């Protein structure tokens, strides 16, 4: 049977939730409720986890080559869904089509292919002095994902977990659950054994919690806010489940004094404004030398008009609405807070009306102190904080003065920038215009998370080492 947004997916079948209830999915550009998905419950989770537990017995013993073969087949089917994926991200997230094509769709194919390639090269057996270490799958993995990259966050977990021989119960965000249906459908059509992948949609407080505490779940892989991640982990750790957390950020971008700033603006704005600033890795704090503040402010103002806000289905639009009323209200509150804290709005405004969509213009606060809440807390919207520094040492200290440590960037002389990068406490640091590397480990220091996604590290995350002391004398 083909996918149907009214169903959940358990043990190789699209079926009804036992709740009989549904959650509406809203288009943030039109405020239209255009789809609904089941509001799953504990009973559904129990059925899905049991199916995954049963399937693990044979899937974990299935040859890697067979798993890889099925995953390649799945990817080919999934690639056929490109137009549908883009259309759904425009509707469920409000992501502009110009951004959706690459970031929400094609890059997810690249990621999947990369995991397939890495899985085939990954050494799963290591010979030590007097033992052999085998990397074995963990078991049933609960994958809980956020709304901001609806497909990306799912791909980052489900693909490596299954390639490594685990089975999965996925709970996508209730706000943007729809593209996950296309992925599950591709798994279904590719012929994965029943129970290897299962999906229950629903609210975090009910479904997410049931997953974190289910005795047959062996690992919880969570992406979302630090607050929920912390709570969820405590629940999961009551039964010592493996945990992996990809959490929030407040990432700094240091512009070294006297650099060619014009060349850095695109990287900065694409990070903090695209996806309406709803990106965990967004460079939300710009650190510039005190003497260059005026020059930089003028430069930022010059480029702001390039970031057109509007209808996400219009190819010219760069910034669509924010994803929901809750996001709209949260970001608006931070814009007000910034002014109360004494920062100055260089550009942007406090939105008052959302009757035509949850639109918020890109905003830049200047005269920001790193001690202000707008500089310390994750706003998760198109809001940039400009902070000045007197010396490079002070810039590094400000960059590191945050509870987070997910991402950072340094712009300027390459050698100097690398020296600075080494002193930043974050899982990823970009130098100048360097592109990202899909095979590099991705994940946070400090309150940005535990564990890594991407490449070999992302695959190993879903394995556990077993040492067999095999140098016996007979
Ligand atoms: P969230 O923490 O509110 O929700 C994430 C997921 O957890 C959702 O599926 C939600 O339904 C579920 N959930 C919510 N409450 C729960 C509970 N009590 N028990 C179990 N599950 C629960 O996050 P969000 O608002 O969906 O996403 C935004 C956050 O995600 C931001 O903080 C962002 O930085 C972070 N994020 C991090 C990364 C990363 O890779 N580090 C990537 C994307 C987003």
Image: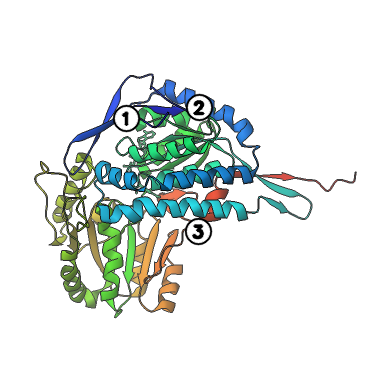
Quarter of the image where one finds residue 226: top left
Give me the C-alpha separation between circle 2 and circle 1: 18 Å
User: Residue at left 55%, top 42%?
Assistant: 70
Crowd class of label 2 (few under 14; some 14 to 19; many from 20; radius 10 Å): many
Q: Quadrant of ligand 1?
A: top left
| Residue indicated by mark 2 | 11
- How far, Cα to Cα, is label 3 from label 1? 34 Å
Q: Residue furthest right?
A: 474
Residue on which disc 3 sits: 439
Question: Residue 427, can we see it?
Answer: yes
Whichever of labels 2 and 3 marks the residue nearer the N terminus, that label is 2
Q: Is residue 425 visible?
A: no
Marks 2,1: beta carbons within 8 A? no
Q: CA distance from mark 2 to mark 3?
A: 31 Å
Give the x, y percent position of residue 220: 48, 38
Which quadrant, please, contains the C terminus?
Answer: top right
- Closer to the eye: label 2 or 3: 2
**Residue drawn at 86 percent across, 45 percent down:** 472
Q: Position of residue 256 (x, y in %)?
A: 33, 75
Residue at 35% of width from left, 47% of height from top?
149
Q: Is residue 86 left or right of residue 126?
A: left
Nearer mark to the viewer, of 3 and 1: 1
Answer yes or no: disc 3 within 8 Å of ligand 1.
no
């Amino acid at each position: 049977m083909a996918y149907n947004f009214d169903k959940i997916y358990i043990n190789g079948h699209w079926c009804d939730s036992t709740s009989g209830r549904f959650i509406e999915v809203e288009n943030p550009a039109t405020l239209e409720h255009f789809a609904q998905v089941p509001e799953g419950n504990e009973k559904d989770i129990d059925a899905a986890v049991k199916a995954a537990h049963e399937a693990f017995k044979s899937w974990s013993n299935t040859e890697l080559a067979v798993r890889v073969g099925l995953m390649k087949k799945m990817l080919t089917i999934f690639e056929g869904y490109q137009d549908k994926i883009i259309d759904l991200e425009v509707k469920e997230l409000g992501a502009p089509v110009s951004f959706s094509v690459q970031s929400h769709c094609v890059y997810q194919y690249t990621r999947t292919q990369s995991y397939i390639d890495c899985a085939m090269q990954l050494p799963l057996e290591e010979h030590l002095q007097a033992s052999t270490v085998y990397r074995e799958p963990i078991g049933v993995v609960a994958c809980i994902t956020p709304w901001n990259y609806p497909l990306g966050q799912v791909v980052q977990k489900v693909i490596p977990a299954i390639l490594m021989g685990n089975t999965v119960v996925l709970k996508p965000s209730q706000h943007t659950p729809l593209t996950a249906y296309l992925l599950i459908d591709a798994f279904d059509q590719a012929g994965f054994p029943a129970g290897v992948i299962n999906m229950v949609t629903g609210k975090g407080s009910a479904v997410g919690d049931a997953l974190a505490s289910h005795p047959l779940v062996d690992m919880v892989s969570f992406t979302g806010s630090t607050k929920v991640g912390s709570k969820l982990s405590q629940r999961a750790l009551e039964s010592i489940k493996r945990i992996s957390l990809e959490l929030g950020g407040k990432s700094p971008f240091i512009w070294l004094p006297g650099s060619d700033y014009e060349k850095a603006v695109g990287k900065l704005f694409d990070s903090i404004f695209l996806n309406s600033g709803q990106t965990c890795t967004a460079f939300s704090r710009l650190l510039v030398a005190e003497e260059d503040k005026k020059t930089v402010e003028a430069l930022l103002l010059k480029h702001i008009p390039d970031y057109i806000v509007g209808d996400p289905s219009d190819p010219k639009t760069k910034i669509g609405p924010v994803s929901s009323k809750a996001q709209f209200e949260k970001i608006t509150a931070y814009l007000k807070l910034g002014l109360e804290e004494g920062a100055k709005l260089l550009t942007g405004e406090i939105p008052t009306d959302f009757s035509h969509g949850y639109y918020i213009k890109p905003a830049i606060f200047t005269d920001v102190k790193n001690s202000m809440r707008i500089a310390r807390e994750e706003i998760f919207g198109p809001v940039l904080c400009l902070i000045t520094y007197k010396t490079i040492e002070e810039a590094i200290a400000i960059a590191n003065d945050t509870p987070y440590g997910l991402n950072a960037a340094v712009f300027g002389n390459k050698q100097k920038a690398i020296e600075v990068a080494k002193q930043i406490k974050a899982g990823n640091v970009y130098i100048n215009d360097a592109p990202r590397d899909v095979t590099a480990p991705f994940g946070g220091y400090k309150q940005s998370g535990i564990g890594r996604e991407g490449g070999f590290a992302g695959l190993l995350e879903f394995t556990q080492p077993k040492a067999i002391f095999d140098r016996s004398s007979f």
